[in-house]
Image (cartoon, grey):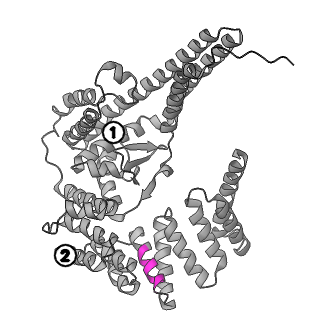
Amino acid sequence: MTAFPPFPAFRAHRLRPLFRLLLTLLAMIAISARPAAAQSMLRDAETEALFQDMMDPLLVAAGLRPGQVQVHLLGDRSINAFVAGSQDIYVFSGLIETADSAEEVQGVLAHELGHIMGGHAIRSSEGMKAVTGISLLSLLLGAAAIAAGGGDAGMGIMMAGQQAALGKYLAFSRTQEATADAAGAQYLSKAGISGRGSLAFFKKLQNLEFRYGVKQDDDQAYGRTHPMSGDRIQALREVYIVDPAWDKPADPKIEARFQRVKAKLSGYIADPDRTLRKYPETDTSIPARYARAYAWHKSAYPDKALGEVEGLLKTDPHDPYFLELEGQVLLESGRPKDAIPPLREAVANSRSQPLIAATLGHALIATEDPANFAEAEKVLKTAVALDNQNPFAWYQLGIVYANKGDQARAALASAERYNLEGGQSGLALRNAETAMQGLPEGSADWIRAQDIALVSRAEVERERKKR
């Protein structure tokens, strides 16, 4: 058999530019569809309440109902936020760490709301459809030219096509970003929130561009998904400085709550030594005590952590979040019985906030005292009724059901848990099927188990086909 001669045009150094363009294009597609599951979700009752109170005036300004858009916190040190689906905003912890004020974060939330109201997450498929068409056509034409013996010409067609596709995608993305900027400015104005924070945050982004040597010319802007920060600042400044809300003072209560949450997050995420340097013991403010409490707790010094909590409670003995922290430190340092009183009061003072209620349920179970299990079942049922997206609460409720011999509902609680945890469809399916066997057919619990089984079975089948 005669061997085919090698194609002289197909050499590694000549393919690299094409591969770089293809990889860049694929990266843009991946980023536009990146799921929130790529980062860990951070859930905290106080933080979520603050986010909602920061978000609601913007929602009303956009013609939506309070609470209609949820804001989620992701454990990622990047300075970023994005919209997933149609009505969920994800904020990275790095953005909260970087922001100096609540108004800066509200500027970001207003921008992301602009994406939601513009339907950008849904319309991204329009931009990708055009890009895919250009890409496939250039690949086909380039392959045809190569097959006809025109290796150089074929490579040129492919590279030009991929460059055109990438340029079209980037232009589409920049247009969406500019539109979201304009919409966000409008929502801030209607909500009576100054654009000072928005400009200040964009200035931070611009300073990062300067630090990392990002060129500010038009050629560099062409290869970006977002407009240059300097251009955005200039365009928005003209809108903000003439707005009636420009000189309006920030809401002092929201700002104070933001500084608490920022310090709490810093204490939770940062290295304890760094936290203790940033918030020395000479600083007796609420944010500083919050941060140090988490730093000492992470360092396995529960007495020092409780000392900081005691200082917090002196400022407000009935603050549910201070009480929650006290209970958390006691519980996680092996004192679940002592954790119950402050957690009970925290649940009562927060009107049964589900995350706090789940922690109380955990403490009641951790005592291993059967006398506490009835209360644990009550508070955990309340927790999942108010927030059924908490896999830990479902796990604890499953323990209660198993302890009382209700294996069917224990299996259903496990199915709920695994249904919420990514990559656990097989376990969700098995537990849902077990629950269905022990529950009265047609009952509400049986129907719920059937729903989980149907969804999980479909996901298991999709995963099987991928292999």
Q: 383 above or below 137?
A: below
Q: Is residue 447 visible?
A: no
Report x, y in % for residue 306.
26, 78
Q: Amino acid at mark 2?
A: Gly
Could you say whether the residue bearing mark 1 is in a helix, strand or loop? helix
**Left or right position of 326 against 133:** left
Rendered position, 159 above or below 279? above
Q: Amino acid at mark 1?
A: His
Residue 71 magenta-highlighted: no
From the top left corner, tell me how far across and down residue 154 is, in percent: 62, 12
**Image quadrant where residue 410 sits:** bottom right
Describe residue 314's horizontal placement relative to residue 60 as left or right.
left
* Label 1: how many Cα within 10 Å (few below 14, some 14–19, many 20+): many
Q: Which residue is mark 1?
A: 111
Residue visible at 87% across and 19% down? Answer: 1
Per the image, the residue denoted by label 2 is 311
